[in-house]
Each structure stands twice: as structure tokens, then as C-alpha cells.
Image (tube, rainbow, N blue to C red):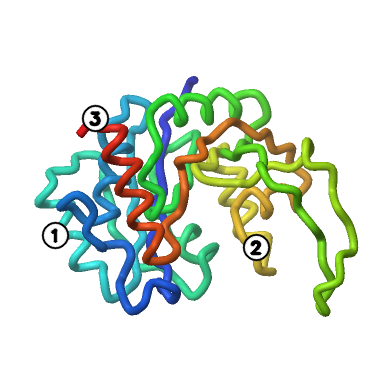
Amino acid sequence: MAGKVGAVIAAAGSSSRMEGVDKTFAPILGLPLVVHTMDRFELSPLVHQIVLVLSKDSVDLGKQMVQQRGYTKVTSVCAGGRRRQDSVRFGLEQLTACEWVMVHDGARPCLDDAMLQRGLEAAAESGSAVAGVPVKDTIKVVSMDQTVQETPERSLLWAAQTPQVFRYRTLLDSHYACTQDFTDDAAMVESMGYRVKMFLGAYENIKVTTADDLIIVEAFLKASSGS
């Protein structure tokens, strides 16, 4: 793929479901959670530049971490905004001379270089691509009173993950044009009429949302390292 690839690691969430623990720096195998994620991007030959977006209170800690780990690709550690999409936009604005950008959740450490490669290949086809996995459960659409309204065809349903990969200009322009709330960057780009390709993520590529998730992620990381 021609052109430099930047990465925005979004880790500015409030950790509201983590029982008072800042999940970004929660210890896993002796290292903060976000270090496991950052290592994947720092060590990948596919990525040229990294911006880490943290909550305002964690920026100084993040800068210390970057220095201690000796990350050479991290060019900025910046504070996020009120919404996730605000945080991603702030991160995008810190990237320089990138043709492509990967947006990834800091709390998803269980990815590998093969997944990044699949993302870039899918984005090269359509300009935008999102990691995901086919859902295993039957999904029900329910009303506010918990009445089932619809049962979509399961074979057509995928659960979206990150990384999500875009032409840099496409994503930044979409962020500037869209003011309503979006749950992920792909939905924003879709709303602008762009074609978005789905590529295979991994069932292990979960996002740490609750304290229980830390135990699951630790097991996945142990298994992948062979320890």
C-alpha cells in the first residue's frame, strides 16, 4: 500500500464500568493495559506514526510511559474530548502527512500484525474498512418495553471492532462534517455515503469494558505469548 499509515489509539474513556479503576492503566501481566496495545502498533512495520489520546488527567502519565517504553513512532500524547469521536478527531489533527489512518481502542490489546494487514488490504479496495466478527448468537431487536420486534438473519450480522482503517482525508472530513453522535468512526463515514468494507478481526479482540474483561484479556495475552 502506498502512503504512510498513522494510528490513533483512543484511550480517553471514563472507565465508568470499571469499579473505579482507570482501565487504560490497569495492570495486566505486569504492564498497563494500554502498553500491550501500544506495543502492537510500535512494533508493526505497517505503521509509521502513532498518536495516543488519553483523558486529560492521564496525559502526563501517558507521556512518561511513552518515554519509559522508548516508543519511537509516538509523535503526540494528547487529551481527548467529551465524546469518543471528539477524542478521535483531536488525535487525527495531530497526525502528519499520512495517507491512511487506523483508529483503534486502547483497551483492545489482543490484536496482531496479520489483522492490521487485513485492514489495510480491505481499505485499499474501498477506502474504508472495519474489523469485525460474525455474531454467534441469534440477535433480537426489542422495543422499549422489552417486546421482540424483529429477529434479523444471523448470517448477515457482524459485531464491529477496531482497528478501523480509512483514507486519512476521508475520515477527517467526515469528522468535521458530522455533528451528531456516532458509536464508531465507520458509522460516521457510512453516513457520508462512503463504502465501508468489513474484514475479519478476531473473537479474542475484545474491548476491556468491565473488571471481568481484564481476566479474559490476560488469558488471551498469556496464550498468544506462549507463557
Q: Residues within 10 Å of mark 2 (few under 14, many from 20)?
A: some
Mark 2 and mark 3 lie on one chain; the one further toward the N terminus is 2
Q: Residues within 10 Å of mark 3 (few under 14, many from 20)?
A: few
Where residue 19 sits, quadrant-wise, is bottom left
* Label placed on residue 181: none
Asked if marks 2 and 3 touch (Cβ < 8 Å), the reply is no
Where does the image place residue 169, in percent across and percent down from the top left? Answer: 57, 43
Residue type at the position of mark 2 = Phe
Where residue 81 sits, quadrant-wise, is bottom left
Q: Nearer the viewer, residue 81 or 21?
A: 21
Judged by depth in the image, the label closer to the viewer, 1 or 3, is: 3
Indicate whether 57 appears above or below 49: below
- Element assignment for label 3: loop
- Residue drawn at x 26%, y 40% is 39
| Separation (CA) of disc 2 from disc 1 | 31 Å
Reading the image, the residue beneath label 1 is: 64
- Residue drawn at x 68%, y 42% is 158
Q: Nearer the viewer, residue 183 or 3?
A: 183
Answer with left or right where residue 182 lies relative to residue 210: right
| Separation (CA) of disc 2 from disc 3 | 38 Å
- Residue drawn at x 86%, y 53% is 151
- Residue 92 in sight in this render: no
Reading the image, the residue beneath label 2 is: 182
Where residue 170 sits, quadrant-wise, is top right
Where does the image place residue 84, in percent across and percent down from the top left? Answer: 51, 65
Answer with left or right where residue 25 lies relative to residue 133: left
Reading the image, the residue beneath label 3 is: 226
